[in-house]
Amino acid sequence: MEQIDTRTIQALDAAHYLHPFTDHAALAASGARVMVRGDGIWLWDSEGNRILDAMSGLWCVNIGYGRQRMSEAVYQQMQTLPFYNSFFNTTNVPAVMLAAKLVELAPPGFNRVFFTNSGSEANDTIVRMVRRYWELMEQPERHIFISRNNAYHGSTIAGVSLGGMAGMHAQGGPLLPGIVHIDQPSYLEHGQGMTEDEFGVVAAGWLEERIKTVGPHNVAAFIGEPVQGAGGVIIPPASYWPEIGRICKKYGILLVADEVICGFGRLGAWFGSERMGIAPDLIAFAKGVTSGYIPLGGVLVGERVGDVLTARGGDFNHGFTYSGHPVACAAALENIRIIEEEALVARVAEDTGPYLGAAFEALRQHRLVGHADSFGFVAGLNLVRSKGANVHAHEVFDGDLGVGMLCRAHMFDAGIIMRAVGDRMIIAPPLVMTRDDIDEMIGRITLALDNTVAELQAKGMLP
Ligand SMILES: *Cc1c(COP(=O)(O)O)cnc(C)c1O
């Protein structure tokens, strides 16, 4: 491999490259970690460190790194037809084949796909499509989207507005009008004094309350991630989504599942909706559809919206130059073939997912871990100062101490990438992980937790 001079790359990076969601003054001071290679579940940086990537890049490298077949599929398509658009009554073979394949994998009632380049564009498309649907239904006053605090739906103006990230909302307003938020179904945060199932119904009830306050005839749709990802792997109680579905049906409002993380095997099903008891009208997807090898996203369109959109009103004036990009679609088709051939969805559902779940539950024994949970191949653990009789009685750290970030640094030092959301440490590992890989991962996590305890004690932040 070509020799990479880390200092040179870091200096050019600091001078010219604006990163997503980054404090550039802080980054320039520390220097970026330069990733140079990936293979399977492992990454290598320019200093030769080998790191276990428990985040699948950014929730997306479901099939792991370095899959030769992906390069070949993309190469073949580039040789044959690197690009053509789908405007003006033209189409291309990979886009058609991928649309048909996605419909085959999707829950019943999904017959159509609209392609975008990202998850943000998928949600942008959903806003435009839902508004258009209600126009065609001659109820244009139905324009309000209801979403949730701490949701992540992307970073375009529609994505950030739909999302419920306080830090994003605080910058660069005004946001898109007509979007309101309810609280997230976080049992840890809001469930004190209730069983999880009781809490799920209560949390879904917040949707009905909000529908009533804004007026049911004004509400277009409710949008949510089956399991909130970037918000910190918030796994809702089993009672939550069926109750949300009942409420949406009662008021005739559209239900949108943002499956950008949860799709393509992450929760042990092709779409998380299947395991969460969600019957959505629209599904946003991206990330795992290509395992991140090439950007691609889109919207799976159910009959209710799709039939109206295609039968009435002529043109839907929306689309992207790269909608249905043949190379991206060829990458997605190969990615899906790999997931099918290696039975990764069933493996996560029946074998490695439950194995990971048991391992995370065992981490609750660690003195720093107040709570740990998982669903399929997402998992999280909460760092606490001391433990009480139940999850609502733990003593948490002062948020200003930044214990999560401190722990994240120890994870890096232990050769594992784990993300910190406040004091909750989260993972979303590649679906190709074996049981041995999971053991290795848990070993590294435990080491990093021990080292975190040692540092906190040395600093007098823990007895
Ligand atoms: C990542 C993400 C998005 C945004 O996708 P991009 O490809 O980054 O635009 C939207 N929704 C969810 C749930 C995501 O995790």
Image (spheres, rainbow, N blue to C red):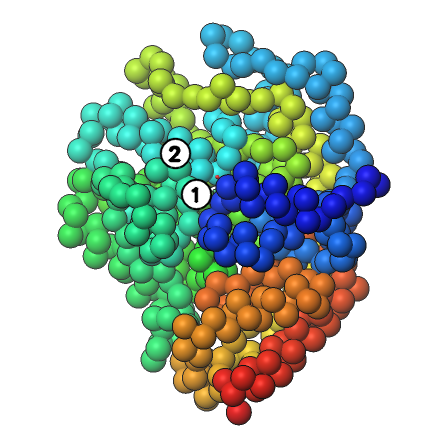
Residue beneath disc 1: 154
Q: Earlier in the sequence, mark 1 or mark 2?
A: 2
Type of amino acid at the residue the image marks with label 2:
Asp
Give the numbered dot on residue 124: 2
Q: Is 153 above or below relative to 132? A: below
In x, y percent, where is residue 157? 35, 38
**Image-based side of 221 in relation to 408, left or right:** left
> In which quadrant is the N terminus drawn?
top right
Q: In this orientation, does residue 377 appear? A: no
- For ligand 1, tell me if the residue under mark 1 lies within 8 Å: yes
| Mark 2 closeness class: few <14, some 14–19, many ≥20 residues within 10 Å | many
| Mark 1 closeness class: few <14, some 14–19, many ≥20 residues within 10 Å | many
Per the model, the C-alpha gap separating discs 1 and 2 is 9 Å
**Image-based side of 323 in relation to 38, left or right:** left
Type of amino acid at the residue the image marks with label 1:
Gly
**Image-based side of 363 in relation to 204, left or right:** right
Q: Residue visible at 61% across and 62% down?
A: 418
In x, y percent, where is residue 255? 36, 43
Q: Residue visible at 41% across and 77% down?
A: 398
Q: Secondary structure at mark 2?
A: helix
Q: Residue visible at 74% across and 46% down?
A: 5
The quadrant holding residue 97 is top right
Q: In this orientation, does residue 406 appear? A: yes
Q: Are marks 1 and 2 in contact (CB under 8 Å)?
A: yes
The quadrant holding residue 352 is bottom right
In x, y percent, where is residue 338? 74, 39
